[in-house]
Image: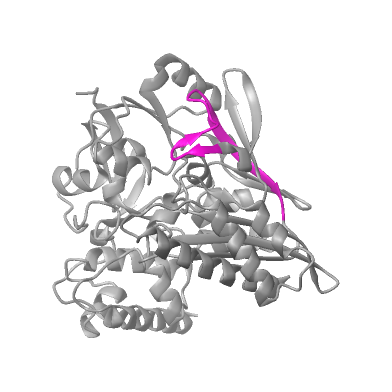
Amino acid sequence: MIPASFDYHRPSDLEGVLALLKEHGDDARVIAGGHSLIPMMKLRMAEVPQLIDLQAIESLKGYSVNGSHVKIGAMVTQHELINSDELAAVAPILRETSLQIADPQVRYMGTVGGNVANGDPGNDMPGLMQCLDATLHLIGPNGTREVAAREYYEAAYVTAREEDEVLTAISFEAPKGGYAYEKQKRKIGDYATAAAAVTIQKDGGKVASASIAMTNLSDTPVWSEAAGNALVGTTCDAGAIKVAVAAMLDDIDPTEDNRGPVAFKKHVAGIILTRAITRAWERA
Amino acid sequence: MSKKMHINLTVNGEHHEFLAEPRELLIYTLRERLNITGPHIGCETSHCGACTVTLNGKSVKACTMFIAQADGAEITTIEGIGSPDNLHVLQRSFREHHGLQCGYCTPGMITRASKLLEENPNPTEEEVRFGMAGNMCRCTGYQNIVKSILAAASEMNAAKEAAE
């Protein structure tokens, strides 16, 4: 399990990162926590002649909460998300999701930026960020730009980020009302067989608005606008949830793998979304 | 072969300086270069936790870190937690409560458990199980591992109270 050789860089600011990306082009890749990239390098499925470590870049660390506006630096780890009472108070779905990612050791290293930027359909943060309608902040040779999480994912490992760009932060308005992140996995540390991120706002005993995104049920996360809309105006009764689940099933496109055949994945997706909607409604 | 790097590392309070290829995995540095063989190689794919060490205050799997990333780090392994003549409370507790059978996972278990109890000195059984979820044991069925950690926690807390 020895990866191919590489040169290692640990720049202390983003200018240094961008300069290295410009100098080395396709040969260079950034590494955050490394728990997606290092296994791929060990298997020699990824070859990275120039490895650029982001660990020394202070501007990528930390988060800010201004009222309901939350901005999280790309190098914030899942462990930090879980242990921040400030973030848990304003957006508890962050902690609920992070607790379901991998295992404790991986969460000390795994970053929100890596999880979001990589484009692995198995990662949990992309679906969450689509549910929250988050904005992804990128920096590149032409300056900074913002991309909506709902527009970022194109296919497995293919995203709107250009090769010479780096994800620096994620921001969103903290959701009001109820929330849930529900995940079915075969064992601790596994990716989801199916997972669902749900937020629901309640008004006068009925659903005022809802946002639903699914993880690992297509080659990208799936924000199902139709599923969320199906709940609006209802009392979130069993009938309404059934309609939302049916709408979600129309939007996903799972493939058969070692987590099961397509029919099973759809079955699990339906159960997981039903549980997530039920829990979010109880909290709304 | 890529250029070798100058690496600085503090392991169990001892400072080490050497040249290494950046791609060297931390677990190999510890075991083969520094002869610190407490952390074991189990799966070598970041699943089993046998290679767990404490690095800059974090429990990490030493099979999933390049030595280049660890340059400048402070590391504690099982050797820095206790010794045969002076066992850590957790080590004694694992012995007393039969928290191991073959022992292969034990250094990782105890290194992880020491960090868990540092962060949460009075965990519930559920919190122990959740906090130890990155460490696998194929012998014990975990029951006695959980028992050992809970017993060590109460012993450490009692000692702390007595000291106050």
Label count reads: 0
Front residue of B42 and A187: A187
A270 in relation to B100, above or below: above
Where residue B99 appears, as percent x and y from the top left, is: 24, 79
Q: Residue furthest right?
A: A204
What's drawn in magenta, residue-wise?
A153-174
Q: Tell me if A182 is positioned left or right of A206 in this view.
A: left
Q: Quadrant of residue B49?
A: bottom left
Relative to B13, is A280 above or below?
Answer: below
In magenta stretch: residue A207: no
Residue at x 22% of width, y 68% of height: B106
Is A128 on the left-hand or right-hand side of B142? right
B125 left or right of A40 in image:
right
Snapshot quadrant of residue A242: bottom right
Residue A12 image point, x, y percent: 50, 29
Residue A163, magenta (yes or no): yes
Say if residue A123 shows up in the picture: yes
User: Residue B125: which quarter of the image?
Assistant: bottom left
Q: Nearer the viewer, residue A35 or B109?
A: A35
Q: Which residue is depicted at the point 67% across and 55% down?
A: A226
State the residue at coordinates (20%, 71%). Answer: B138
Residue A282: percent from the left, percent from the top? 69, 75
